[in-house]
Amino acid sequence: MNAKTCAVPRPFLLLWPVLFLFAGCPSGPGQGGPNTVEEIHRITTELGGKVDTIATNQNALIERQKDLEARTGERMQLAADQVDGAFYVNERNAVNPYQRLTGEKLKTAASLLGQPTPESQKRVIEELRLALGASQQDQALLAAMLEEERGKAAEAVAARDAALKAVGAATVQVQSATTALQTTATKLTSAEERARLEAAVAKDAQEAKAKAQAANTRLHIAYGFMGLGGLLIVAAIVATFLHVPGVLAGGLAGGGALLALGWLLTVLEDLLRKRWFQISLGVVLLAAVGIVGVLIYRAWKTRRKATMDAAIGQGAIGAIQEAKNDDAKLGREVYTSLRPYLKEWFVDDDGKPDTTIEKEIDQRLLALNLKNPQGAEAAVLNALRGVSTVTDPAKDPHVAKDPILASPPGGGS
């Protein structure tokens, strides 16, 4: 077989399915949408404004309450002064059941209202003096003093009522701001709930996407192993057909294991996460790489052997044919003595001459132009005759290859 023309497999090409293993897997944490984030920011800002409004309204309410307390205190002081004056006047009446009962009631009212002012006691004494006076001037002055007291009382009542209304209005404002704050807080809670929901949905979508990408990557890996296994089986069969010894069983076993492994990856989803399977996967992959290495080494040895066989066979048939052509010229029968050995080597299984090999040899000899017995003489013929055309025998390529040719026929060393 001519190794220069035979097709030798190249097992390193079996590694192309590994390219499928480089599928990318992007990932990232799910987050709320930008609209939700902007809404939360807006509601938080609004919530801060509502809190400021409540603080302002509460301060206003405190001021109104202080004013109400002051007005109420003024009113009660006026009432205390009037009760004290009435009690003072009543004590100066003649003793009778009415006077005594009126005094008791005034005493109880005085205990509820508090202490009168010193100016009030002086005023009551003056008013009593004027009331006991008989002149019209005293009566007019008393009437003016009583009218002034009634005016102050009316002003105190009006001021307290106004303060009470202001407190009510401030309370309403605080309640309104509180309601608005509660509404805003509810909106914020709803926005946060939507944000959490969107984040959960985004996370689920991201996990689903990651699972889909992992499944896609797993399929790529599975197809890679199945393709590698198939190519390994084909390579083993082709190598066996090309007479590479000892590769069929290993190639079939390794290819079958890779095919089975790839099929398992397409069926079982969680295998890649299990440590024992990862170790088994590594062992199988190393075994497959080892088998590929063995195929490469044996293919190289087969190629080298085929090359050497071609060179040896080409040289041998050329030398034998030249010897056959030169037998008549030298008067010898070298080919005749070799012919029985050649027939012994080139026979078929039935012991008959292998005509296929004979035809191949004839074709090669024709290509070498050695089938014509009258053709050009072989370069070694003169050496066999004892005549050298080369001054320095060492420069004769035939002599250099075979030192025996440097000695004349019949000569010994």
Image: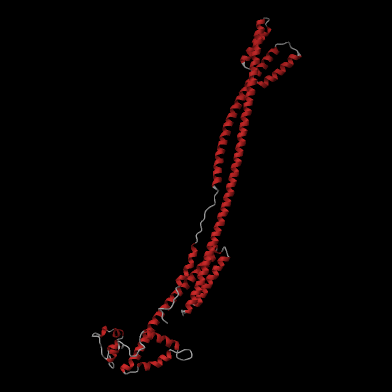
Residue shown at 51% from the left, 69% from the top: 227
Q: Residue furthest top?
A: 135
Report the front residue among 354 and 407.
Answer: 354
Is residue 29 shown above or below 382?
above
| Residue 320 horizontal side relative to residue 158, left or right | left
Q: Tell which of 289 and 129 is nearer to you.
A: 289
Give the image location of residue 161, x and y in percent: 65, 23
Residue 155 position within the rendered picture, expressed as x and y whole percent measured from the top left: 63, 18
Q: Is residue 138 left or right of residue 14?
A: right
Say above or below: 19 vs 374: above
In the depicted structure, whether residue 229 falls above or below residue 68: below
Residue at 61% from the left image edge and 39% from the top image edge: 183
Quarter of the image with the N terminus in it: bottom left
Please provide percent x and percent y for residue 29: 53, 52
Q: Is residue 97 above or below residue 341?
A: above
Is residue 246 at least partly visible in the picture? no
